[in-house]
């Protein structure tokens, strides 16, 4: 029995250390609403691809958040799962975390109030990212995006 307690304490120490490392280096700790380094890696440094991905993400979050309102729990969980994956793709960690909360609340049979609260957090995080995307795209030269898109299509 003593050996089992020692193993549990050792495992507990390892888990505590691992969790503190995760918290210290968590993407959610970034100051920006979009992790620039992650987005740059995911778009291979291609500014026009980055712009396109951000535009799609902004449109998608509006549509999917609208679909969450009044959705059945299983549907809400599936929608939130989609948002979570998209948010992780661009480094919108706060949106991904909020979407994960919706997914968990909806799929675990959480109360309507819990699901609604999680959806509210997701909508707020999504709006914040959409605002950041709009500001970013407003400052990007549109002609550079068109030129790069022409290069990709071989025109």
Image (cartoon, helix red, strand yellow):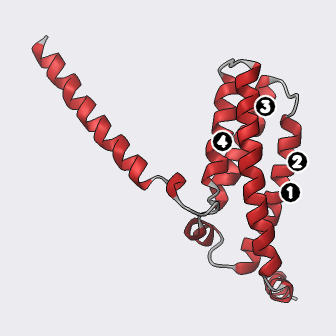
Question: Of the residues under marks 2 and 3, which one precedes in the sequence?
Answer: 2
Residue at 20 percent across and 26 percent down: it is 9
Q: Nearer the viewer, mark 4 or mark 2?
A: 4
The disc at residue 63 is 2
Q: Quadrant of residue 108?
A: top right
Density class for disc 2 (Cα within 10 Å; few <14, some 14-19, many ≥20) is few
Callout 2: SS: helix
The vertical placement of 111 against 60, above or below, is: above
> Gap in Å between the C-alphas at discs 4 and 2?
16 Å
Please report contact status of discs 3 and 4: CB closer than 8 Å, yes or no. Answer: no
Q: Quadrant of residue 98?
A: top right
Label 1 sits on residue: 59
Q: Nearer the viewer, mark 3 or mark 4?
A: 4
Q: Position of residue 56 (x, y in %)?
A: 82, 61
Label 4 sits on residue: 98
Question: Of the residues under marks 3 and 1, which one precedes in the sequence?
Answer: 1
Q: Position of residue 59 (x, y in %)?
A: 86, 57
Q: Quadrant of residue 79?
A: top right
> Gap in Å between the C-alphas at discs 4 and 1?
18 Å
Is 51 positioned to the left or the right of 25 in the image?
Answer: right
């Amino acid at each position: 029995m003593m050996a089992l307690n020692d193993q549990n304490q050792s495992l507990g120490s390892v888990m505590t250390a691992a969790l503190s490392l995760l918290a210290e280096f968590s993407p959610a700790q970034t100051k920006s609403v979009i992790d620039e380094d992650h987005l740059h890696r995911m778009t291979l440094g291609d500014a026009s691809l980055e712009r396109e991905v951000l535009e799609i993400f902004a449109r998608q979050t509006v549509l999917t958040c609208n679909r969450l309102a009044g959705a059945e729990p299983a549907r809400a969980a599936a929608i939130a799962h989609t948002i979570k994956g998209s948010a992780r793709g661009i480094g919108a960690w706060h949106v991904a975390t909020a979407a994960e909360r919706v997914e968990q609340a909806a799929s675990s049979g959480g109360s309507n109030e819990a699901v609604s609260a999680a959806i509210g957090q997701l909508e707020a995080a999504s709006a914040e990212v959409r605002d950041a995307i709009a500001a970013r795209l407003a400052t990007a030269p549109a002609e550079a995006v068109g030129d790069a898109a022409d290069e990709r299509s071989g025109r």
